[in-house]
Image (cartoon, helix red, strand yellow):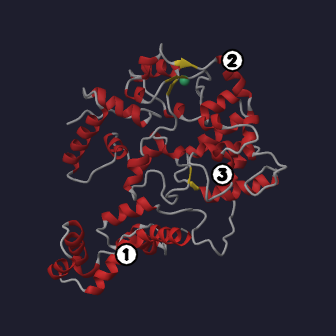
Protein backbone atom coordinates (compact mmCIF):
# COMPACT_ATOMS: atom_id res chain seq x y z
CA UNK A 1 0.00 0.00 0.00
CA UNK A 2 0.99 3.58 -0.51
CA UNK A 3 0.02 6.76 1.40
CA UNK A 4 -2.15 8.90 -0.89
CA UNK A 5 -2.13 12.59 0.19
CA UNK A 6 -4.90 14.91 -1.02
CA UNK A 7 -3.74 17.14 -3.83
CA UNK A 8 -3.76 20.84 -2.81
CA UNK A 9 -5.36 23.77 -4.68
CA UNK A 10 -3.42 24.65 -7.85
CA UNK A 11 -0.65 22.21 -6.88
CA UNK A 12 1.67 21.37 -9.79
CA UNK A 13 1.77 17.68 -10.84
CA UNK A 14 5.48 17.33 -10.01
CA UNK A 15 5.01 18.98 -6.63
CA UNK A 16 2.35 16.36 -5.86
CA UNK A 17 4.67 13.59 -7.08
CA UNK A 18 7.34 14.93 -4.69
CA UNK A 19 4.96 14.91 -1.73
CA UNK A 20 3.88 11.31 -2.46
CA UNK A 21 7.56 10.40 -2.66
CA UNK A 22 8.50 12.05 0.64
CA UNK A 23 5.42 10.84 2.55
CA UNK A 24 6.14 7.27 1.56
CA UNK A 25 9.82 7.48 2.46
CA UNK A 26 11.22 7.11 -1.08
CA UNK A 27 13.94 9.31 -2.51
CA UNK A 28 13.63 8.47 -6.20
CA UNK A 29 10.64 9.74 -8.24
CA UNK A 30 10.83 6.75 -10.61
CA UNK A 31 10.66 4.28 -7.73
CA UNK A 32 7.71 6.26 -6.33
CA UNK A 33 5.80 5.98 -9.61
CA UNK A 34 6.64 2.28 -9.92
CA UNK A 35 5.35 1.57 -6.41
CA UNK A 36 2.24 3.71 -6.96
CA UNK A 37 1.57 1.90 -10.24
CA UNK A 38 1.80 -1.57 -8.72
CA UNK A 39 -0.40 -0.45 -5.80
CA UNK A 40 -3.05 0.78 -8.27
CA UNK A 41 -2.80 -2.38 -10.36
CA UNK A 42 -3.49 -4.56 -7.36
CA UNK A 43 -6.39 -2.33 -6.25
CA UNK A 44 -7.99 -1.99 -9.66
CA UNK A 45 -7.05 -5.45 -10.95
CA UNK A 46 -5.75 -4.33 -14.34
CA UNK A 47 -2.43 -4.89 -16.02
CA UNK A 48 -2.20 -2.05 -18.54
CA UNK A 49 0.79 0.25 -18.27
CA UNK A 50 -0.22 3.73 -17.18
CA UNK A 51 1.55 7.02 -17.87
CA UNK A 52 2.88 9.08 -14.93
CA UNK A 53 0.08 11.63 -15.24
CA UNK A 54 -2.56 8.85 -15.14
CA UNK A 55 -0.94 7.34 -12.06
CA UNK A 56 -0.86 10.71 -10.28
CA UNK A 57 -4.51 11.43 -11.15
CA UNK A 58 -5.58 8.05 -9.78
CA UNK A 59 -3.54 8.49 -6.60
CA UNK A 60 -5.24 11.89 -6.16
CA UNK A 61 -8.60 10.25 -6.86
CA UNK A 62 -9.23 12.65 -9.73
CA UNK A 63 -10.63 11.97 -13.19
CA UNK A 64 -7.71 12.24 -15.64
CA UNK A 65 -9.16 15.22 -17.53
CA UNK A 66 -9.81 17.16 -14.32
CA UNK A 67 -6.30 16.43 -13.08
CA UNK A 68 -4.71 17.52 -16.37
CA UNK A 69 -6.81 20.70 -16.56
CA UNK A 70 -6.22 21.75 -12.95
CA UNK A 71 -2.76 20.48 -12.06
CA UNK A 72 -0.58 20.21 -15.19
CA UNK A 73 0.73 22.85 -17.59
CA UNK A 74 -0.48 20.84 -20.58
CA UNK A 75 -3.47 23.15 -21.27
CA UNK A 76 -0.94 25.94 -21.86
CA UNK A 77 1.80 23.95 -23.60
CA UNK A 78 -0.74 22.45 -25.98
CA UNK A 79 -2.99 25.52 -26.17
CA UNK A 80 -1.94 26.12 -29.78
CA UNK A 81 -0.38 23.14 -31.47
CA UNK A 82 0.24 21.50 -34.83
CA UNK A 83 0.10 17.96 -33.47
CA UNK A 84 -3.00 15.86 -32.68
CA UNK A 85 -5.10 18.98 -32.50
CA UNK A 86 -8.35 17.05 -32.27
CA UNK A 87 -7.33 15.48 -28.96
CA UNK A 88 -8.56 17.42 -25.90
CA UNK A 89 -6.30 17.93 -22.86
CA UNK A 90 -6.31 14.78 -20.74
CA UNK A 91 -8.06 12.52 -23.26
CA UNK A 92 -6.51 9.08 -23.20
CA UNK A 93 -7.17 8.08 -26.83
CA UNK A 94 -3.48 8.49 -27.72
CA UNK A 95 -1.46 7.02 -24.83
CA UNK A 96 1.86 8.27 -26.24
CA UNK A 97 0.62 11.86 -25.95
CA UNK A 98 0.13 11.42 -22.18
CA UNK A 99 3.54 9.77 -21.86
CA UNK A 100 5.31 12.40 -23.95
CA UNK A 101 3.50 15.53 -22.86
CA UNK A 102 1.77 14.63 -19.57
CA UNK A 103 3.79 16.25 -16.81
CA UNK A 104 6.38 18.29 -18.70
CA UNK A 105 7.11 21.75 -17.37
CA UNK A 106 6.29 24.92 -19.29
CA UNK A 107 9.58 26.62 -18.44
CA UNK A 108 13.02 25.67 -17.33
CA UNK A 109 13.20 26.61 -13.63
CA UNK A 110 11.02 26.17 -10.53
CA UNK A 111 9.23 29.36 -9.38
CA UNK A 112 7.98 30.18 -5.88
CA UNK A 113 6.29 33.01 -3.98
CA UNK A 114 7.73 33.35 -0.43
CA UNK A 115 4.41 34.74 0.85
CA UNK A 116 2.46 31.78 -0.57
CA UNK A 117 5.01 29.40 0.99
CA UNK A 118 4.36 30.90 4.45
CA UNK A 119 0.58 30.96 3.97
CA UNK A 120 0.46 27.37 2.74
CA UNK A 121 2.52 26.22 5.71
CA UNK A 122 0.01 27.91 8.03
CA UNK A 123 -3.05 26.59 6.18
CA UNK A 124 -2.00 23.10 5.10
CA UNK A 125 1.00 22.42 7.30
CA UNK A 126 3.15 22.07 4.20
CA UNK A 127 4.41 24.30 1.38
CA UNK A 128 3.96 23.27 -2.26
CA UNK A 129 4.64 24.47 -5.80
CA UNK A 130 1.78 26.39 -7.39
CA UNK A 131 1.00 25.75 -11.04
CA UNK A 132 0.12 29.41 -11.72
CA UNK A 133 3.70 30.42 -10.83
CA UNK A 134 5.17 28.03 -13.43
CA UNK A 135 3.59 29.77 -16.43
CA UNK A 136 6.00 31.56 -18.82
CA UNK A 137 5.90 35.33 -18.32
CA UNK A 138 4.61 35.13 -14.73
CA UNK A 139 7.27 36.60 -12.45
CA UNK A 140 5.13 38.12 -9.71
CA UNK A 141 2.46 36.46 -7.59
CA UNK A 142 -1.05 37.21 -8.74
CA UNK A 143 -2.35 36.90 -5.18
CA UNK A 144 0.30 38.91 -3.32
CA UNK A 145 1.59 41.14 -6.12
CA UNK A 146 5.15 40.52 -4.91
CA UNK A 147 8.13 39.20 -6.92
CA UNK A 148 8.59 35.45 -7.43
CA UNK A 149 11.90 33.71 -6.91
CA UNK A 150 13.28 30.81 -8.94
CA UNK A 151 15.48 27.79 -8.43
CA UNK A 152 17.55 26.41 -11.30
CA UNK A 153 16.14 23.35 -13.10
CA UNK A 154 13.07 21.33 -12.20
CA UNK A 155 14.44 18.87 -9.65
CA UNK A 156 13.40 21.34 -6.94
CA UNK A 157 9.74 20.40 -7.51
CA UNK A 158 10.36 17.14 -5.68
CA UNK A 159 11.24 19.04 -2.46
CA UNK A 160 9.02 21.57 -0.65
CA UNK A 161 9.59 25.19 -1.82
CA UNK A 162 10.20 26.20 1.82
CA UNK A 163 13.64 24.58 1.44
CA UNK A 164 14.62 27.17 -1.16
CA UNK A 165 13.47 30.38 0.51
CA UNK A 166 17.01 31.54 1.19
CA UNK A 167 18.66 30.18 -1.98
CA UNK A 168 16.09 31.17 -4.64
CA UNK A 169 17.01 34.04 -6.98
CA UNK A 170 14.42 36.77 -6.45
CA UNK A 171 13.19 39.10 -9.21
CA UNK A 172 13.92 42.75 -8.63
CA UNK A 173 10.99 44.68 -7.12
CA UNK A 174 11.68 47.82 -9.22
CA UNK A 175 11.76 45.79 -12.44
CA UNK A 176 8.49 44.09 -11.52
CA UNK A 177 6.72 47.42 -11.05
CA UNK A 178 8.04 48.47 -14.47
CA UNK A 179 6.75 45.23 -16.08
CA UNK A 180 3.37 45.61 -14.41
CA UNK A 181 2.86 48.88 -16.30
CA UNK A 182 3.57 47.31 -19.71
CA UNK A 183 0.16 46.72 -21.30
CA UNK A 184 1.54 44.04 -23.63
CA UNK A 185 2.89 42.03 -20.70
CA UNK A 186 -0.47 42.44 -18.95
CA UNK A 187 -2.28 41.12 -22.04
CA UNK A 188 0.18 38.24 -22.38
CA UNK A 189 -0.46 37.06 -18.82
CA UNK A 190 -4.24 37.36 -19.14
CA UNK A 191 -4.35 35.52 -22.50
CA UNK A 192 -2.19 32.69 -21.07
CA UNK A 193 -4.55 32.38 -18.09
CA UNK A 194 -7.59 32.26 -20.38
CA UNK A 195 -6.02 29.63 -22.64
CA UNK A 196 -5.32 27.50 -19.54
CA UNK A 197 -9.08 27.30 -18.94
CA UNK A 198 -9.80 25.65 -22.30
CA UNK A 199 -10.09 21.90 -22.56
CA UNK A 200 -8.81 21.50 -26.11
CA UNK A 201 -6.11 23.07 -28.29
CA UNK A 202 -6.36 25.40 -31.26
CA UNK A 203 -4.55 24.22 -34.36
CA UNK A 204 -1.56 26.08 -35.79
CA UNK A 205 -3.36 26.18 -39.09
CA UNK A 206 -6.44 27.91 -37.73
CA UNK A 207 -4.45 30.41 -35.66
CA UNK A 208 -2.09 31.17 -38.57
CA UNK A 209 -5.03 32.04 -40.81
CA UNK A 210 -6.68 34.26 -38.21
CA UNK A 211 -3.45 36.03 -37.21
CA UNK A 212 -2.37 36.53 -40.81
CA UNK A 213 -5.60 38.34 -41.65
CA UNK A 214 -5.14 40.55 -38.61
CA UNK A 215 -1.46 41.24 -39.47
CA UNK A 216 -2.50 42.34 -42.97
CA UNK A 217 -4.99 44.78 -41.43
CA UNK A 218 -2.26 46.16 -39.15
CA UNK A 219 0.42 46.38 -41.88
CA UNK A 220 2.71 43.86 -40.20
CA UNK A 221 4.96 41.67 -42.33
CA UNK A 222 3.46 38.19 -42.28
CA UNK A 223 5.32 35.90 -44.63
CA UNK A 224 3.84 37.18 -47.87
CA UNK A 225 3.76 40.84 -46.79
CA UNK A 226 5.65 43.77 -48.25
CA UNK A 227 9.21 44.43 -47.12
CA UNK A 228 8.29 48.00 -46.25
CA UNK A 229 6.32 46.70 -43.26
CA UNK A 230 8.22 45.90 -40.06
CA UNK A 231 9.18 42.33 -39.19
CA UNK A 232 6.95 40.82 -36.57
CA UNK A 233 9.91 39.75 -34.41
CA UNK A 234 11.15 43.37 -34.41
CA UNK A 235 7.77 44.60 -33.17
CA UNK A 236 7.87 42.04 -30.34
CA UNK A 237 11.34 43.27 -29.33
CA UNK A 238 10.15 46.84 -29.32
CA UNK A 239 6.93 46.36 -27.31
CA UNK A 240 7.99 43.99 -24.53
CA UNK A 241 10.73 44.67 -21.96
CA UNK A 242 13.84 42.83 -23.14
CA UNK A 243 14.73 41.21 -19.81
CA UNK A 244 11.15 39.97 -19.34
CA UNK A 245 11.20 38.68 -22.91
CA UNK A 246 14.47 36.79 -22.36
CA UNK A 247 12.94 35.03 -19.37
CA UNK A 248 9.62 34.31 -21.09
CA UNK A 249 10.80 33.42 -24.57
CA UNK A 250 14.49 32.40 -24.44
CA UNK A 251 14.58 31.93 -28.24
CA UNK A 252 14.69 35.75 -28.48
CA UNK A 253 18.41 35.56 -27.65
CA UNK A 254 19.06 34.58 -31.28
CA UNK A 255 17.20 37.58 -32.62
CA UNK A 256 19.02 40.39 -34.43
CA UNK A 257 17.23 43.57 -35.41
CA UNK A 258 16.01 43.41 -39.01
CA UNK A 259 16.58 39.66 -39.30
CA UNK A 260 13.85 37.05 -39.27
CA UNK A 261 13.44 34.85 -36.21
CA UNK A 262 11.75 31.66 -37.35
CA UNK A 263 9.94 31.08 -34.03
CA UNK A 264 8.11 34.39 -34.33
CA UNK A 265 8.07 35.35 -38.00
CA UNK A 266 6.76 31.98 -39.22
CA UNK A 267 3.66 31.84 -37.07
CA UNK A 268 1.59 33.24 -39.93
CA UNK A 269 2.47 30.25 -42.10
CA UNK A 270 0.44 27.20 -41.13
CA UNK A 271 2.94 24.74 -42.66
CA UNK A 272 5.86 26.11 -40.65
CA UNK A 273 4.43 27.50 -37.42
CA UNK A 274 6.24 27.58 -34.10
CA UNK A 275 6.71 24.72 -31.70
CA UNK A 276 5.99 26.85 -28.67
CA UNK A 277 2.58 28.24 -27.82
CA UNK A 278 4.30 31.22 -26.13
CA UNK A 279 5.13 32.58 -29.60
CA UNK A 280 1.42 32.72 -30.47
CA UNK A 281 0.53 34.33 -27.14
CA UNK A 282 3.14 37.04 -27.70
CA UNK A 283 1.58 37.57 -31.12
CA UNK A 284 -1.96 37.75 -29.77
CA UNK A 285 -0.84 40.40 -27.26
CA UNK A 286 0.41 42.58 -30.13
CA UNK A 287 -2.34 41.93 -32.65
CA UNK A 288 -5.38 42.57 -30.44
CA UNK A 289 -6.36 45.51 -28.26
CA UNK A 290 -7.61 43.39 -25.35
CA UNK A 291 -7.29 39.76 -24.20
CA UNK A 292 -11.05 39.37 -24.73
CA UNK A 293 -10.72 40.49 -28.34
CA UNK A 294 -7.89 37.99 -28.90
CA UNK A 295 -9.83 35.10 -27.37
CA UNK A 296 -12.93 36.05 -29.35
CA UNK A 297 -10.96 36.05 -32.58
CA UNK A 298 -9.51 32.62 -31.83
CA UNK A 299 -12.78 31.00 -30.86
CA UNK A 300 -15.30 32.69 -33.11
CA UNK A 301 -13.63 33.48 -36.43
CA UNK A 302 -15.12 31.41 -39.23
CA UNK A 303 -12.51 30.05 -41.62
CA UNK A 304 -13.48 29.53 -45.24
CA UNK A 305 -12.64 26.05 -46.52
CA UNK A 306 -10.68 25.87 -49.76
CA UNK A 307 -10.94 23.13 -52.37
CA UNK A 308 -7.64 21.66 -51.26
CA UNK A 309 -8.66 21.53 -47.62
CA UNK A 310 -8.85 17.82 -46.93
CA UNK A 311 -8.19 18.64 -43.29
CA UNK A 312 -10.64 20.65 -41.22
CA UNK A 313 -8.87 23.87 -40.15
CA UNK A 314 -10.36 23.43 -36.68
CA UNK A 315 -8.29 20.32 -36.30
CA UNK A 316 -5.12 20.85 -38.33
CA UNK A 317 -2.65 18.14 -39.11
CA UNK A 318 -3.78 14.78 -37.77
CA UNK A 319 -1.60 11.86 -36.67
CA UNK A 320 2.07 12.28 -37.40
CA UNK A 321 4.09 9.32 -38.66
CA UNK A 322 5.27 8.16 -35.25
CA UNK A 323 1.67 8.09 -33.98
CA UNK A 324 0.64 6.07 -37.03
CA UNK A 325 3.48 3.64 -36.42
CA UNK A 326 2.47 3.31 -32.78
CA UNK A 327 -1.12 2.53 -33.73
CA UNK A 328 0.08 0.07 -36.41
CA UNK A 329 2.12 -1.83 -33.79
CA UNK A 330 -0.74 -1.77 -31.29
CA UNK A 331 -3.09 -3.34 -33.86
CA UNK A 332 -0.65 -5.96 -35.20
CA UNK A 333 -0.47 -4.22 -38.57
CA UNK A 334 -4.24 -4.36 -39.20
CA UNK A 335 -5.05 -1.40 -41.46
CA UNK A 336 -8.76 -1.23 -40.64
CA UNK A 337 -8.08 -1.14 -36.92
CA UNK A 338 -5.51 1.64 -37.40
CA UNK A 339 -8.08 3.63 -39.38
CA UNK A 340 -10.65 3.10 -36.61
CA UNK A 341 -8.11 4.51 -34.13
CA UNK A 342 -8.39 7.88 -35.86
CA UNK A 343 -11.19 9.83 -34.16
CA UNK A 344 -12.51 11.10 -37.50
CA UNK A 345 -12.36 10.09 -41.15
CA UNK A 346 -8.95 10.47 -42.70
CA UNK A 347 -8.80 9.05 -46.19
CA UNK A 348 -5.06 9.01 -46.61
CA UNK A 349 -4.21 6.78 -43.63
CA UNK A 350 -3.87 3.57 -45.69
CA UNK A 351 -1.76 5.37 -48.29
CA UNK A 352 0.47 6.82 -45.63
CA UNK A 353 0.99 3.43 -43.97
CA UNK A 354 1.88 2.06 -47.39
CA UNK A 355 4.37 4.83 -48.07
CA UNK A 356 5.98 4.25 -44.68
CA UNK A 357 6.68 0.67 -45.77
CA UNK A 358 4.18 -0.79 -43.29
CA UNK A 359 2.09 -3.47 -45.08
CA UNK A 360 -1.39 -4.57 -44.07
CA UNK A 361 -0.79 -7.71 -41.98
CA UNK A 362 -4.42 -8.63 -41.45
CA UNK A 363 -4.61 -10.88 -44.54
CA UNK A 364 -5.65 -14.51 -44.14
CA UNK A 365 -5.60 -14.90 -40.36
CA UNK A 366 -2.12 -13.77 -39.62
CA UNK A 367 -0.35 -15.59 -42.46
CA UNK A 368 1.44 -12.35 -43.41
CA UNK A 369 2.85 -12.00 -39.91
CA UNK A 370 4.08 -15.61 -39.99
CA UNK A 371 5.71 -15.10 -43.37
CA UNK A 372 7.53 -11.89 -42.34
CA UNK A 373 8.72 -13.61 -39.19
CA UNK A 374 10.12 -16.57 -41.13
CA UNK A 375 11.60 -14.67 -44.06
CA UNK A 376 12.82 -11.43 -42.48
CA UNK A 377 13.23 -12.10 -38.76
CA UNK A 378 14.35 -15.76 -38.88
CA UNK A 379 16.25 -15.26 -42.19
CA UNK A 380 14.85 -18.40 -43.84
CA UNK A 381 14.93 -18.66 -47.65
CA UNK A 382 12.03 -17.31 -49.69
CA UNK A 383 10.95 -20.79 -50.80
CA UNK A 384 11.13 -22.22 -47.29
CA UNK A 385 9.12 -19.31 -45.87
CA UNK A 386 6.42 -19.69 -48.52
CA UNK A 387 6.25 -23.45 -48.05
CA UNK A 388 6.03 -23.23 -44.26
CA UNK A 389 3.34 -20.57 -44.14
CA UNK A 390 1.33 -21.48 -47.23
CA UNK A 391 1.13 -17.84 -48.32
CA UNK A 392 0.34 -17.16 -52.00
CA UNK A 393 2.99 -15.73 -54.29
CA UNK A 394 0.74 -12.75 -55.05
CA UNK A 395 0.49 -11.93 -51.36
CA UNK A 396 4.29 -12.22 -50.99
CA UNK A 397 4.80 -9.88 -53.90
CA UNK A 398 2.44 -7.28 -52.39
CA UNK A 399 4.09 -7.53 -48.97
CA UNK A 400 7.62 -7.15 -50.31
CA UNK A 401 6.64 -4.24 -52.53
CA UNK A 402 5.15 -2.41 -49.55
CA UNK A 403 8.16 -3.14 -47.36
CA UNK A 404 10.29 -1.63 -50.13
CA UNK A 405 8.21 1.54 -50.41
CA UNK A 406 10.26 3.48 -47.88
CA UNK A 407 13.29 2.75 -50.09
CA UNK A 408 11.80 4.38 -53.19
CA UNK A 409 12.93 7.97 -52.41
CA UNK A 410 16.51 6.72 -51.86
CA UNK A 411 16.48 4.78 -55.15
CA UNK A 412 15.15 7.82 -56.98
CA UNK A 413 18.09 9.86 -55.66
CA UNK A 414 20.54 7.14 -56.79
CA UNK A 415 18.98 7.12 -60.25
CA UNK A 416 19.20 10.91 -60.42
CA UNK A 417 22.88 10.99 -59.41
CA UNK A 418 23.68 8.23 -61.96
CA UNK A 419 22.04 10.31 -64.68
CA UNK A 420 23.97 13.42 -63.73
CA UNK A 421 27.23 11.68 -62.94
ZN1 LIG B 1 1.90 34.54 -3.36
Give coordinates of residue 23: x percent, y percent.
Answer: 28, 27
- Residue at 21% in and 69% down: 373
Q: Quadrant of ligand 1?
A: top right
Rounded to the nearest angstrom, the CA distance separating label 3 from label 2 is 33 Å
Whichever of callouts 1 and 3 sits on the residue coming sooner in the sequence is 3
Residue 409 versus residue 289: which sits nearer the camera? 409
Q: Residue 61 carries which label?
A: none
Tell me the element at label 1: helix
- Circle 2 residues within 10 Å: few <14, some 14–19, many ≥20: few
Q: Does the numbered disc 2 mark a residue whose Cβ is under 8 Å from ligand 1?
A: no
Q: Residue 267 carries which label?
A: 3
Residue 224 versus residue 27: which sits nearer the camera? 224
Q: In this image, 139 relative to 297: left or right?
A: left
- Residue indicated by mark 1: 402
Q: Does the numbered disc 1 mark a residue whose Cβ is under 8 Å from ligand 1?
A: no
Whichever of callouts 1 and 2 sits on the residue coming sooner in the sequence is 2
Q: Is residue 203 positioned above or below 175 on the image?
A: below
- Circle 3 residues within 10 Å: few <14, some 14–19, many ≥20: many
Amino acid sequence: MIIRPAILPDELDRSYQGRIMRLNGYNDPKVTIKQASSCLQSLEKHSQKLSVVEILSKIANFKLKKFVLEHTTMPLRRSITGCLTEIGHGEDTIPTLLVRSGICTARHDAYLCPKCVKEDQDTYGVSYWHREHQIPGVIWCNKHGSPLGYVDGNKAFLSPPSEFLSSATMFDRALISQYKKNKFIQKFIKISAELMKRNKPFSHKRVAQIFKQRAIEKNIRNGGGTFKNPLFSDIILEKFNLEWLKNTFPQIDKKEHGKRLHHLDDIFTAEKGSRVSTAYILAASILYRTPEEALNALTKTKIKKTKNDTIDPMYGTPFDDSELKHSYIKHDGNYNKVVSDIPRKELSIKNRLNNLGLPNLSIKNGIAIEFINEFIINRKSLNESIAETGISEDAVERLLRTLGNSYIPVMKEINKSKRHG
